[in-house]
Amino acid sequence: MSTDTDILQTGALNPRGLRYLHEIAVHGGVRAAADALGINASVISRQVTQLERAHGVALLERQGRRVTLTEIGLSLVDHFRESRRRDAEMLVQLEDYRGLRRGRIGIGCGEGFVGNLMAIVLERFSAQFPDIVVDLHTGATSEIIAMVRNDEVDLGLCAGGAKDPAIRSRTFRAAPFCAFVSPRHPLAGLQRIRFEQLADARLIFMPPRFGVQQYVDSIIRAERLSLTPAYRCDMFAAAQAKVDERREGFGGCHWQRFCNLT
């Protein structure tokens, strides 16, 4: 059986084939990878086949109706990611030598953090480095962690943390956890409320994959409460619009400076 060293010694690795193999790993299949790249699936299949023939190994295998990467295929994907990571680090060094006059930084961010991030942090950053493009992507905690792991962004900001050994994480204290309600809601006049006071409210929760919702669920379990949401919504802006449209308002758990939850 060929090893990574054998493959590297038989000739140069095709960068395009490695990139397509990486996209198959990220998107879960040849067709999904082609759709994400906006190309024909046969283009990806042809490049992967050429890579297999050049080095005498099988990179893909069929499991039922799904196509997955073989062990050596996954090794090549890791090699591609590491090479791309080293290239990115070198480009950062080159930009440092150029005095940060030009460049790009990718940030993955939970939607609830976007407002403060743009108004406080990125506004100052852009003023100091006007020619550096900030690429901002939003998503749930798991999605942001995946963005960082797959080198789609340079850093992520989200509720919760990552236990992935390939990711270095830093924690910080966030704003108080609050209930986000309509100004006309009976709870709106309170400075501090307890979770049990939300028992009769029509709640809007985020889907379970969001770190902020996982935190809410853990508190509900610890307090032995039974809180059933009227809605689940994966967009903070849409949840806010739903709160605003009702006269009586809806109780919802959200990162905002309104009624502090205890």
Image: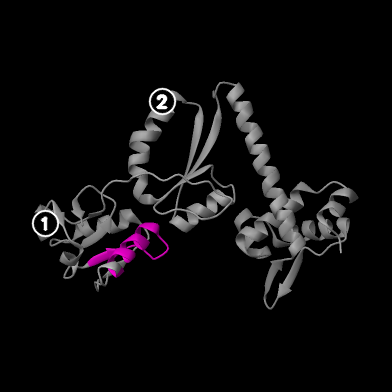
SS category of the residue bearing label 1: loop
Q: Is residue 211 above or below residue 170?
A: below
> Magenta segment, which residues?
203-221
Mark 2 Cα within 10 Å, few/some/many (few <14, many 20+)? few
Numbered mark located on residue 184 in the image: 1
Amino acid type, mark 1: Arg
Task: Evaluate if marks 1 and 2 touch, with contact meaning CB atoms under 8 Å apart.
Answer: no
Task: Find out whether residue 212 is within the magenta segment.
Answer: yes
Q: Position of residue 114 (x, y in %)?
A: 37, 45
Q: Is residue 220 above or below residue 244?
A: below
Residue placed furthest toward the front: 222
SS category of the residue bearing label 2: helix
Please give the count of numbered marks on the rendered protein.
Answer: 2
Residue at the image point whose x is 42% and y is 29% from the top? 125
Rendering quarter of residue 103: top right
Q: Considering only order in the chain, which callout, 2 or 1, is on the residue closer to the N terminus? A: 2
Q: Position of residue 105 (x, y in %)?
A: 52, 37
Q: Position of residue 115 (x, y in %)?
A: 33, 43
Residue placed furthest toward the bottom: 64
Q: Is residue 259 above or below residue 103?
A: below
Residue 19 visible in rendering: no
Which residue position holds label 2?
A: 127
Q: Nearer the viewer, residue 222 or 93?
A: 222
Q: In the rendered view, does 51 fall on the left or right side of 236?
A: right
Rendering quarter of residue 47: bottom right
Q: Quadrant of the N terminus?
A: bottom right
